[in-house]
Amino acid sequence: MRVLRTFLIILPFVFVSCRTESQYDPVTIFDPNRDPYQDLQHATIEAQRTERYILLDVGGEWCIWCKKLDTFFNENADIKTFLQANYVAMKVNYSPENKNEKFLAQFPKIAGYPHFFVLNEQGQLIHSQETGSLESGDHHDRDKVLAFLKKWIPSRE
């Protein structure tokens, strides 16, 4: 009887701690050990759940412009908030350790890094964007980046 009573006391806590829906864990660094297929599957589920598009950010920790882009979003909180409200952002590593060639072969050829691919909520390519045109001098241009993000947001009717 004591075991049954203990079980009945603990049971509600077990149900609360077990989640039926997995929480999306954003891919925020270029990690050569990540599986981009699995990451995209999770990003697609999250995009469908939240009615957002997917923004693949292809690059590497070796890439100075990739770091500048991260700094740009961190220093422009309003643009970062806009990005997060409209896109499920996902980094895809490209580096000597792992070029993710098989994964990236499904997309148009990339000429330089970082590179963006905009996907719809089903994970289908909508747009390929080199990021050089989003720069001004030695930094990313606020108006150009925001115009790019606004151009490809999902229509919410």
Image: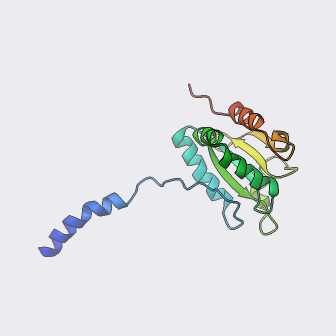
Percent coordinates x, y for residue 110 in the rendering: 84, 50
Percent coordinates x, y for residue 134 in the rendering: 81, 40
Whether residue 137 sits left or right of residue 77 in the image: it is right
Percent coordinates x, y for residue 70 in the rendering: 71, 52
Image quarter of the C terminus: top right
In which quarter of the view is residue 12 placed? Answer: bottom left
Task: Name above or below for residue 62 compared with residue 121.
Answer: below
Query: Which residue, as the protein is rendered here, is positioned at the far left?
Result: 1
Percent coordinates x, y for residue 102 in the rendering: 77, 59
Q: Front-most of 153 and 145?
A: 145
Q: Front-most of 99 and 79?
A: 79
How is the structure coloured here?
A: rainbow
Whether residue 100 sits left or right of residue 25 in the image: it is right
Image quarter of the N terminus: bottom left
Counting the numbered discs, the total is: 0
Query: Which residue, as the protein is rendered here, is positioned at the far top?
Result: 157
Name which residue lies at 55% across and 47% down.
Answer: 46
Name which residue lies at 68% across and 58% down.
Answer: 36
Task: Name above or below for residue 11 compared with residue 106.
Answer: below
Name which residue lies at 74% across and 56% down.
Answer: 103
Whether residue 83 sits left or right of residue 66 in the image: it is left
Name which residue lies at 81% across and 58% down.
Answer: 63
Whether residue 129 sits left or right of residue 122 in the image: it is right
In which quarter of the view is residue 25 placed? Answer: bottom right
